[in-house]
């Protein structure tokens, strides 16, 4: 089955794709510019206040290992916070630590493939998705163009 998504998009709509390592850095830098404190750490547990659903002034306690540049051993620390943003991926340690609940997820593999500029031009206005049991019984295959390569999964 082939669907030309371009025929369904309005002139002011688009399908955006990004390279996570660049997007993540941009978001971190922007948060820091707005006053966030950057910590190089690994969350180990979260104390969720009993009244967190009814009291907007509740504070969570993060337990984490803080890592200094060039070290492989973390130092145990805690931090009290008003809000938690778990932006650590599909198998989020943060979501598990704060008992965010069950959610459906799929595991996918992607390879980044560097192709010639000529072949990259083919993907200037296109991304490919393949659906069907011959590709995957419960997911899809793809070729997504990135800045200088394609992601194939």
Image (tube, grey):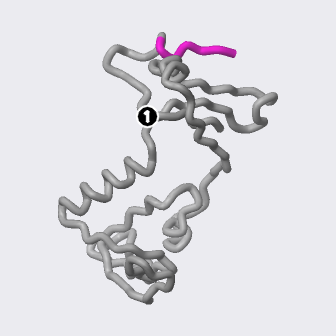
> Is 8 on the left or on the right of 110, as rendered?
left
Along the line of sight, which residue is nearer the eye, 56 or 59?
59
Q: Is residue 2 rendered magenta in the image?
A: yes
Q: Residue furthest top?
A: 7
Q: Residue furthest left?
A: 34
Identify residue for label 1: 147
- Secondary structure found at label 1: loop
Residue 118 inside the magenta-drawn segment: no
Q: Looking at the picture, how far across and down is residue 132, in whole percent?
A: 75, 27
Main SS of the magenta part reads loop
Residue 136 x/y as whole percent: 76, 35
The residue located at (66%, 46%) in the rendering is 108
Please give left or right for residue 111 compared with residue 55 in the image.
right
- Image quarter for residue 25? bottom left
For the N terminus, the image quarter is: top right
Q: Residue at point 49% right, 24% down?
A: 117
Within 10 angstroms of label 1, few (less than 14), some, or many (20 or more) residues?
few
Range drawn in magenta = 1-6
């Amino acid at each position: 089955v082939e669907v030309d998504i371009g025929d369904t998009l309005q002139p002011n709509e688009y399908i955006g794709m990004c390279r996570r390592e660049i997007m993540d850095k941009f978001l971190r830098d922007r948060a820091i510019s707005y006053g966030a404190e950057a910590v190089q750490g690994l969350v180990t547990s979260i104390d969720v206040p009993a009244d967190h659903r009814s009291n907007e002034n509740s504070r969570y306690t993060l337990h984490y290992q803080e890592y200094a540049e060039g070290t492989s051993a973390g130092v145990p620390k805690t931090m009290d916070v008003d809000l938690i943003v778990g932006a650590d991926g599909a198998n989020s340690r943060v979501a598990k630590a704060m008992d965010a609940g069950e959610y459906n997820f799929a595991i996918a593999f992607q390879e980044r493939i560097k192709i010639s500029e000529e072949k990259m031009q083919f993907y200037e206005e296109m991304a490919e998705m393949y659906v069907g049991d011959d590709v995957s019984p419960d997911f899809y295959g793809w070729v997504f163009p990135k800045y200088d390569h394609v992601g194939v999964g």
